[in-house]
Amino acid sequence: MEMLSGHTIVCGYGVVGQRIVETLLEHGIKFVIVEYDHEVAKKSIEKGYTVIEGDATSSHVLKNAGVATAKAIAIAMDNDAKNLFAVLTARDMNKNIFIATRANDRLVREKMIEAGADYIVMPQNSASDEIVAEITK
C-alpha cells in the first residue's frame, strides 16, 4: 500500500462503517477500512476500497492503516470495549489524530473521553432523540 497521509481510517465496516464510507466518498476524502471479518474485508476490496484485514485494537494493524499520518479515525465497531481499546491505541500512536467513535454505554463514554476520543456518538440516544423530536413536533 502506498504511503497515505491526511486520510481517514474507518474501523469496522458494518452498518455504521458503511455509512461513514459513503459520506467520505461523497466528500472525496481518502480512507482506509480496517475490518476483522474476512468475508466483509473481501467484499470491501472487491468494491475497490483499500482494506487492512485485522483487529483495529492492534497497534500493528493501525500502523499498517497509516495511523501515524492519518487526519482522523472513525471507530465504528459494535463492541464498546474494542472501541475503547482502539481509541487508546490510536491516541497513543498519533497525538494529533481526530478520533470519532461510538459508544452504547454512558460509563464507557466517560472512559472514551479520558482515553482521548474527540467525538463520541451514542446511536441509541441519537435514535431516541430523533424519534421524540418527531413525535413532539
Image (cartoon, rainbow, N blue to C red):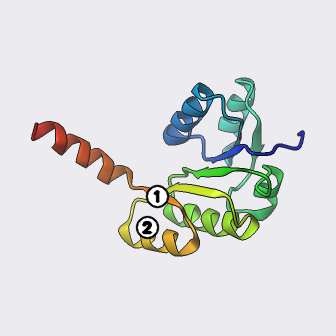
Disc 2 marks which amino acid?
A: Arg
Q: Nearer the viewer, residue 57 or 114?
A: 114
Rendered location of residue 82, percent (x, y): 58, 63
Residue 132: quadrant of the picture: top left
Dot 1 crowding, Cα within 10 Å, few <14, some 14–19, many 20+: some
Numbered disc total = 2
Q: Is residue 19 above or below residue 99?
A: above
From the image, which quarter does the C terminus lie in? Answer: top left
Q: Nearer the viewer, residue 112 or 83?
A: 112
Rendered location of residue 92, percent (x, y): 71, 70
Q: Earlier in the sequence, mark 2 or mark 1?
A: 2
Q: Is residue 116 above or below residue 60?
A: below
Q: Nearer the viewer, residue 100 or 76?
A: 100
Q: Is residue 89 above or below residue 41?
A: below
Which residue is pictured at 51% across the width and 34% down the height? 19
Query: Are circles 2 and 1 on residues that touch, CB within 8 Å?
Result: yes
Dot 2 crowding, Cα within 10 Å, few <14, some 14–19, many 20+: many
Which residue is pictured at 65% across the width and 36% down the height? 40
From the viewer's perspective, is 60 left or right of 25? right
Residue 120, numbered circle: 1
Which residue is pictured at 77% across the width and 64% down the height? 59
Disc 1 marks which amino acid?
A: Ile
From the viewer's perspective, is 70 left or right of 117? right
Which residue is pictured at 67% across the width and 67% down the height? 91
Between the residue at mark 2 and the residue at mark 1, the CA separation in whole angstroms equals 7 Å
Residue 109, numbered circle: 2
